[in-house]
Image: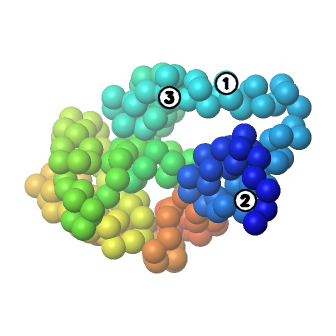
Amino acid sequence: MAMTVEPIARVARALSSLPGIGPKSAQRLAYHLLNSPDADIEELADALRALKGSVVVCSSCFNVTSSDPCSVCSDSQRDRSFLCVVERPSDIAPIERTGRFHGLYHVLHGSLSPSKGIGPEDLKLAELLPRLRSAEVTELILATNPTLEGEATAMYIRQMVASVDVKVTKLARGLPYGADLEYADDMTLGQAIELRQGF
Ligand code: ZN
């Protein structure tokens, strides 16, 4: 049994609650932090403390942002005829990185999952219809994750918007099934956007 130093173990425990960080990585990071300059540690602690207080949700697209409306919604250069539906705020950065999409977003904040008790009313689904009806949207791109929940959510949206005169497309196949958009490489995701199909 390795010797545990409580302050280090505490940081390691906190870090290991993050997605993708196992106990070993958490411990390595904790020791790394211990040996980091004081200024770096203070900046990290300040940034973490400020995170919750300074982030709001965009009242238009529901992306997380430091100002409402967010930088995408308030950018007059964005093409308002394209609306891309994603599950999470973290899905936007990888799509932006591909440089292939210049429209607006709509963040659902999750996906339908009966097994987890997540229904349509738990997502930003009701807020999608007014955006389609009032805005000049001509194409709705469904960029939900290629997972069971993501597919079910896309299917639900397609039915929900059936009465609206809008073209519905979905990211092309080629994204690994079961993976999160967030972890797709730029090339694969870029192609999936370019080759999106009618849905
Ligand atoms: Zn926005």
Residue at the image point whose x is 15% and y is 56% from the top: 160
Category of crowding for the residue at label 3, using alpha-carbon neighbours closer than 10 angstroms: few (below 14), some (14–19), many (at least 20) = few
Q: Is residue 25 left or right of residue 20?
A: right
Amino acid tagged 3: Lys
Which label sits on residue 25? Answer: 2
Name the spot of residue 191 as percent of width and height, x first: 56, 68
Tag nearer the camera, 2 or 1: 2
Question: Which residue is located at x 19 percent, y 38 percent?
Answer: 130
Q: Secondary structure at mark 2?
A: helix
Q: Residue 175 appears at what percent x and percent y?
A: 51, 73
- Sooner in the amino-acid sequence: mark 3 or mark 1: 1
- What number is the disc on residue 46? 1
Can residue 26 be seen? yes
Q: Using a 10 Å C-alpha cutoff, classify the residue at mark 2 as few (fewer than 14 neighbours), some (14 to 19) or many (20 or more).
A: some
Q: Which residue is mark 3?
A: 52
Residue at 89% in and 40% down: 35
Q: What number is the disc on residue 79? A: none
Image quarter in which the N terminus is found: bottom right
**N-terminal-most mark, 3 or 2:** 2
Distance from the alpha carbon under mark 2 to that under mark 1: 22 Å
Local packing at callout 1 (Cα closer than 10 Å; few below 14, some 14-19, many 20+) is few
**Residue kind at label 2, given as amino acid type:** Ser
In this rendering, is residue 104 above or below 75?
A: below
Which secondary structure, mark 1?
helix
Residue behind label 3 places its C-beta within 8 angstroms of ligand 1: no
Depth check: give the residue in front, 147 or 171: 147
Q: Decide if residue 49 is on the left or right side of residue 166.
A: right
Q: Is residue 164 above or below residue 41?
A: below
